């Protein structure tokens, strides 16, 4: 059992790399101080217990302990004591009571910014507070600085009980005396030989302290071979943290030196990224050697500390002054990091060729992050060389993230983009610049029509199923790029088109009734994607002549489902066909958006019940379209001529609607009436166009699709 004074004056504590960054909020720090202050006031003679500090002794002769659990409280207490030390602004000086507090006994592995900011707070926080430089402004966004400011304010408020009153030094000294000598933590030391990563993940998996991906990270790091210089663990951590920032290009997440060595030349990166050890050599070779003075916080000058602290950690992108002549556009990734990890894992397993008899042992890898830890556990159980697997996973994680940034669209404000970010050296600075992934410099591209189709196809897939889970289309696209990392635009478009075509024929226009021999048998998305990569089965199985039209409307021969049950992908696919046939003119600026409500243009419940339409027409695909829920609620019960006028009242608003809706509005206006006959004609025209387009199979050679 250690008092806070004993805890912060004796021994040395290190926060290992597998721990999270300090993340306590203003509320957390305020609550801790409030609890201690209230206990000091109500029960000043009784001890106050903060909980357990779990440690592992790293160096017995020097009493160095690795902090396995409790690092958030330990860091917060250190910050609070620094705040007490600098309370002179309140007219209170605790220098005599804190003569023993002459250094910080807490440090962070591979988190230079956290370590140096903590030392700045201990030495002289005014260097940060009164500095207007951009690097100091960055430090002020760090949770450590936020905790320091919160503690300072809370302590001043405790000493200055009421506004306008003089300070009460005696109250401050009582609080300090209680904090140092009556507040205790129980320090427990794990037995020698304990697998710290394993203990850490099991302990933290009991509650909500850690995200599942952090558990997976700790586990994979624990399998890496022991390296005296810990280079492999450091590089693994750097890659993981860089790739976890899904709303930024991964290139930006690396400091300048490794960035220029890795990413300045794409061919170089592709070659270096083939091997984890090669990546380790490049990343570690790019680091500048630090002097002993910088490495030793006890000997560092305040200026040196500030210069070191301003450097952002590897988990944050480096943003040098003057480096961005072209600012990074703000965009939203289509997927979050846990589900991206599953994509990487699934592609690794899918591309790992094994003898036919061993394939039955392959674990199922569902693209749903709710089972993230269990899924990785199942894979790791089958791996005999877990060190090799961890290295390969890190390598593939960076490799696929680079390809993801280049070939998968991003949501940019109200549109979609497909750009590549690169850096070039300009004098002493690195300048970032963007260019279209598929530019019109390629000979096969005419007026950028193919890149437009690639963006349209990907956005069509995404808006049809915007959830972060079960992104089978993205898995297929990334697996294609992983196998052929430098595809030309035409072949990539062909692959995406065949994927959409297979979704329609093998899923959305197929039946799940195995006894029905007249229609295509519905396949799972996993089966569809597997077929695309299997030279034996071919790219698809569905046949045009066996399309099950009952899936998209109620015809004279069936009454299977209401129109709102038609899958959204079918509507978006139809919109893509309409745009593809006329990419210029009125349809030129069409954008796939999150239209998530099926609208019956002829209403299901007209105000005049005598105008009810027969279900065969009402629920026909010809009468249906996708709209936003807001649009549906505004116009749902209006008659067709009223909707045609209301929907098209503003030209700009009309252009934001789905192409199918725009087509219906145009017909309703031109023909003056939207009835059963018009609906039937629209349905037959839609079926005819889908058949014509679905017959357009664009084969790609399995062995070499880029030729």
Image (cartoon, grey):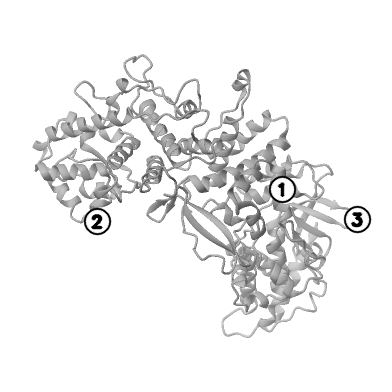
Residue on which the image places disc 2: 652
CA distance separating discs 3 and 2: 75 Å
Residue name at image x 40 percent, y 40 percent:
461
Pick whichever, 127 or 409, lies toward us: 409
Choose top left, top right, bottom left or bottom right for residue 685: top left
| Spot occupied by residue 703 in the image (x, y as percentages of width and height) | 53, 28
Specify the label residue 280 is tagged with.
1
* 399 over 120 or under it: above or below: above
Callout 2: SS: helix
- The tag earlier along the polypeptide, 3 or 1, is 3
- How many discs appear? 3
Disc 3 or disc 1, which is closer to the eye? 1
Identified at 52% across, 31% down, the residue is 704
**Residue receiving disc 3:** 61
What is the residue that sits farthest to the front in this orientation? Answer: 443
Label at residue 601: none
Closer-to-camera residue (306/588): 588
Asked if 679 appears above or below 631 in the picture, the reply is: above
Q: Is residue 178 shown above or below 11?
A: below
**Of the residues tagged 2 and 1, which is closer to the observer?**
1
Q: Is 195 on the left-hand or right-hand side of 203?
A: right
Q: Where, by quadrant of the figure, is residue 504 drawn?
A: top left
Q: Residues within 10 Å of mark 2 (few under 14, many from 20)?
A: few
Spatial CA span between label 2 and label 1: 53 Å
């Amino acid at each position: 059992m250690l008092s806070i004074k004993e805890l912060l004056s004796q021994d040395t504590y290190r926060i290992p790399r597998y721990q999270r960054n300090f993340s306590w909020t203003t509320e957390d720090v305020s609550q801790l101080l409030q609890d201690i202050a209230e206990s000091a006031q109500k029960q000043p003679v009784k001890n106050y217990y903060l909980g357990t500090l779990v440690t592992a002794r790293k160096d017995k002769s020097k009493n160095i302990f690795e902090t396995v659990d409790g690092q958030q409280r330990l860091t917060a207490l250190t910050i609070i004591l620094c705040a007490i030390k600098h309370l002179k602004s309140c007219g209170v000086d605790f220098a005599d009571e804190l003569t023993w507090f002459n250094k910080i006994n807490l440090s962070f592995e591979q988190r230079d910014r956290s370590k140096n900011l903590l030392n700045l707070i201990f030495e002289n926080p005014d260097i940060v507070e009164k500095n207007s430089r951009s690097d100091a402004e960055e430090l002020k966004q760090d949770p450590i600085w936020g905790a320091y400011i919160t503690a300072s304010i809370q302590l001043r408020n405790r000493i200055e009980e009421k506004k306008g009153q003089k300070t009460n030094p005696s109250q401050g000294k009582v609080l300090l005396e209680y904090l140092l000598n009556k507040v205790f933590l129980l320090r427990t030391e794990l037995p020698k030989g304990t697998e710290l990563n394993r203990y850490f993940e099991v302990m933290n998996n009991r509650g909500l302290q850690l995200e599942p991906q952090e558990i997976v990270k700790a586990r994979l790091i624990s399998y890496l071979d022991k390296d005296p210089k810990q280079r492999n663990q450091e590089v693994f951590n750097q890659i993981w943290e860089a790739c976890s920032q899904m709303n930024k290009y991964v290139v930006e997440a690396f400091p300048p030196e490794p960035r220029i060595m890795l990413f300045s030349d794409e061919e170089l990166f592709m070659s270096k990224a083939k091997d984890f050890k090669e990546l380790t050599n490049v990343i570690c070779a790019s680091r500048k050697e630090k002097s002993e003075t910088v490495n030793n916080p006890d000997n560092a000058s305040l200026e040196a500390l500030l210069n070191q602290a301003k450097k952002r950690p590897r988990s944050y992108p480096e943003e040098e002054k003057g480096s961005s002549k072209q600012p990074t556009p703000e965009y939203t990734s289509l997927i979050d990091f846990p589900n991206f990890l599953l994509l990487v894992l699934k592609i690794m397993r899918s591309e790992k060729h094994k003898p036919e008899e061993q394939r039955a042992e392959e674990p199922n890898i569902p693209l749903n992050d709710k089972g993230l830890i269990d899924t990785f556990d199942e894979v790791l159980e089958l791996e005999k060389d877990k060190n090799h697997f961890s290295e390969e996973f890190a390598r593939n994680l960076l490799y696929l993230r680079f390809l993801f940034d280049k070939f998968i669209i991003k949501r940019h404000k109200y549109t979609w983009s497909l750009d590549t970010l690169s850096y070039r050296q300009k004098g002493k600075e690195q300048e970032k610049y963007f260019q279209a992934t598929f530019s019109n410099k390629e000979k096969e591209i005419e007026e950028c029509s193919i890149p437009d189709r690639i963006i349209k196809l990907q956005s069509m897939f995404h808006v049809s199923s915007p959830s972060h889970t079960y992104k089978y289309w993205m898995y297929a696209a990334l697996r294609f790029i992983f196998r052929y990392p430098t595809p030309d635009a035409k072949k990539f478009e062909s692959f995406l088109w065949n994927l959409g075509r297979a979704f329609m024929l093998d899923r959305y226009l197929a039946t799940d009734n195995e006894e029905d021999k007249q229609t295509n048998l519905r396949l799972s998305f996993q089966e569809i994607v597997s077929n695309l990569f299997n030279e034996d089965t071919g790219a698809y199985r569905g046949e045009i002549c066996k399309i099950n039209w009952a899936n998209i409307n109620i015809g004279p021969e069936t009454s299977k489902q209401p129109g709102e049950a038609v899958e959204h992908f079918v509507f978006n696919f139809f919109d893509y066909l309409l745009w593809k046939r006329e990419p210029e003119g009125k349809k030129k600026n069409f954008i796939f958006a999150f239209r998530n409500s099926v609208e019956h243009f002829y209403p299901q419940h007209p105000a005049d019940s005598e105008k009810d339409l027969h279900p065969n027409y009402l629920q026909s695909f010809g009468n249906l379209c996708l709209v936003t829920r807001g649009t549906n609620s505004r116009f749902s019960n209006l008659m067709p001529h009223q909707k045609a006028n209301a929907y098209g009242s503003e030209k700009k608003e009309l252009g934001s609607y789905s192409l199918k809706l725009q087509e219906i509005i145009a017909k309703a206006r031109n023909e003056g009436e939207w009835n059963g006959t018009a609906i039937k004609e629209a349905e037959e025209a839609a079926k005819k166009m889908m058949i014509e387009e679905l017959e357009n199979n664009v084969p790609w050679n399995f062995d070499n699709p880029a030729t």
